[in-house]
Amino acid sequence: MTTVVAESVTQLSAFSDPASVAVVGASADPAKWGYWLASGALTGEHRRRVHLVNRRTDTLLDHACHPTLSALPDVPDLVALCVPAPFVSDVVDEALALGVRGFLGVTAGVTDEAELASRIRSAGARLVGTNSLGIYDSATDLSLAWGRFTPGPLAIISQSGQLGSELAALGARHGVGVSRFVSIGNQSDVTAAELLADLGNHDPTRVIALYLESFRDGESLFRTLRALRDTGKPTLLLTVGASAASTRLARSHTGSLTSALDVVDAACRAAGVLRVSTPDELVTVARAFLATTVPAGDRVAIVGDSGGQCAVAADVTSANTLTVPGLSQALTESLAGRLPSGAASSNPVDLAGAGEQDLGSYADVVECLLSADESDAVVLTGYFGCYARDAPALAEREAAVAERIGRASAETGKPVVVHTMAPESSTAQVLWRHGVPVFDTIDSASRALAGLSRLRPPVPPNQAPSETVPQGPLRPGYWAARELLAELGVDFPDGGVVRTREEAVELAGRLRAPWVLKASWLEHKSEAGGVAVGIAGTQHLVRSFDDMHARLGDGDYVLEEQDTRSGTVEILVGARRDPDLGPVIVVGAGGTETEVLQDIALEVAPVGPESALAMLERLRCMPLLRGWRGRPAASVDSLVGVITRVSRLITERTDIAEIELNPVRVAPDGALTVDALVVAAEPAPAP
């Protein structure tokens, strides 16, 4: 037996188009993994050599069976491991000695699988799994998985094999087949990011379904997803809240306010990835994406033939973060001229029986709305699609209207999504063929359109200012944080460090009263009684210092001028380094009630001025910054500057785990930070 490995096998090619496959643990029992992998492998026998290995029989599934890998006539590119866990290590050692370069690990419960994966990598080989449900590639007729797949444009990369199978089954039920399926299992070696990157040149793949429970090396993962989106292949991500990214840094408000999914959602926005909540939602959006175009914006025009269905559609659409804007007077009048007297024409547009008078009115109204620059998409809801079912004589006429709607959508580049009471009708099939997705509920139609809207290519990130961030060792305490941030360009009140009553009195003579006294070394000063505000004179200062010193002891105390400007708004600006997904920036309503208000926005860092302003616009407290009930507007530009600088600091200083400025007091004449915390990252563990 030769030990020469086929030259075509390079890294991951063994898992997509191997020249030869060996199934170790092949079986004739349909209840066993060995049957499904063996029978699946044999479906690709016209393309590659398939070897079955089972020491108990000479023949299996009408094919010759070999007792060991060493008995094969040639070295397989890929070995599928479906033997009991105690035997996996020995089979791997035998395969590595022969020169095998690819392993699919189906077996679960393998002892010390990390060591096994390391042994495989050290030999120049790769492993998908362990605990994998298998792999499939429609382009190369490779099927090594439990179950069978229908070919199509949807690639599925799933940490859960069974959930991946559910996605494939849901897709097949709705006419969306699978281009490639990889159950990554425990990711002992080959990672999701590597498999996703390999989809960039996979021609059958048009959209990607990704299920992950953890985000190991998440920064690399989302860079890969961004690159895929740039090639026109968007990813629909299904995940759960208990991921590895849920590790929180609870030493500040920033750490306690944000969750795993907040960070994942920020990474998704930056990469142009859509996070969905259920397998059904994923398949619903995938179907729509494969059928039609992505809308340029969130404005939706609603057309129906029932006032009630129009009203429900408007409510559901608005609840899905889309907008249903009123139409201009000119467009309203144009629509009214096409409809019976009394029909609603302002959005939603209710045909009020026009369809019964002339089926073409459905297309007339949709074409009018699509040609106007007042909406980015149209939802058609109600009875359309039922004429062919309920009155077969009208089938041909209704199909012609459906074709007109499809042509109008294609010509304008705006999607039309249809909710019909007859999703199984011949008209519904005509709509699908002409690029108009059809759903049986308004909920599904609205979710599909909302998902399409969020699949718009991500806006290239505007860059944060490129000034050099301050370097040097990190020191604990507020004063050290203040010095670091001040060097970055963040403004603080005038003040200084004092250690005695006499030093406090001397410094106060150079500062404007009232003053604030703080125990610099405390992270949560208010809770520990480490801050005194409104100190108006020397005697008051002496009493405050003596009281704080008696309770807290020696240390660096900070005396500052108190910010007494009118019209200030307190804002939190924080940043943290997520252990899996990297640096993020957080803004929100600040002050001592931050956790109560829970008014925050989070993005991947760094952010530039436009992104920082967009974050502020998402806050419920933004009207306070703009000027509320006659109050002057605060200096939003100065706050934006603070946000961009802090985002740059957390990005470039990898020795920083967390930063918090709370509150940043923003007034018409600028932003002053009156408390800050910088937390050093834990040292990397020794190898």
Image: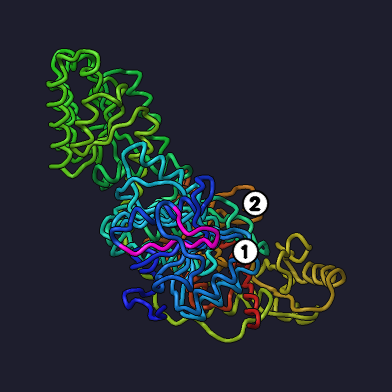
Q: Please, what secondary structure does the residue beneath circle 1 have?
A: loop
Q: Is residue 423 above or below residue 435?
A: above
- Residue marked by disc 2: 593
Tell me which residue sits at (34%, 64%) in the image: 49
Tell me which residue sits at (41%, 70%) in the image: 76
Q: Amino acid at mark 2?
A: Glu
Residue 217 sits inside the magenta stretch: no
Q: Quadrant of residue 51?
A: bottom left
Which percent across, then down, holds residue 253? 63, 59
Q: How is the image coloured?
A: rainbow
Which percent across, then down, holds residue 332? 19, 27
Tag nearer the camera, 2 or 1: 1
In this view, the residue in front, 362 or 599, is 362
- The answer for how far apart the CA atoms under marks 2 and 1 are is 50 Å
**Residue 334 visible within the image:** no
In this view, the residue in front, 129 or 44, is 44
**Could you classify mark 1 by the number of other residues whose Cα lies within 10 Å: few (under 14), some (14-19), or many (20 or more)?**
some
- Image check: 638 left or right of 331? right
**Could you classify mark 2 by the number of other residues whose Cα lies within 10 Å: few (under 14), some (14-19), or many (20 or more)?**
few
Which percent across, then down, holds residue 137? 34, 56
Task: Please identify the quadrant where the N terminus is shown.
Answer: bottom left
Q: Earlier in the sequence, mark 2 or mark 1?
A: 1
Q: Is residue 486 above or below residue 551?
A: below
- Residue marked by disc 1: 110
Q: Quadrant of residue 362?
A: top left
First to last magenta residue range? 48-60
Which percent across, then down, holds residue 641? 44, 68
- Image check: 444 left or right of 264? left
Q: Amino acid at mark 1?
A: Val
**Residue 225 visible within the image:** yes
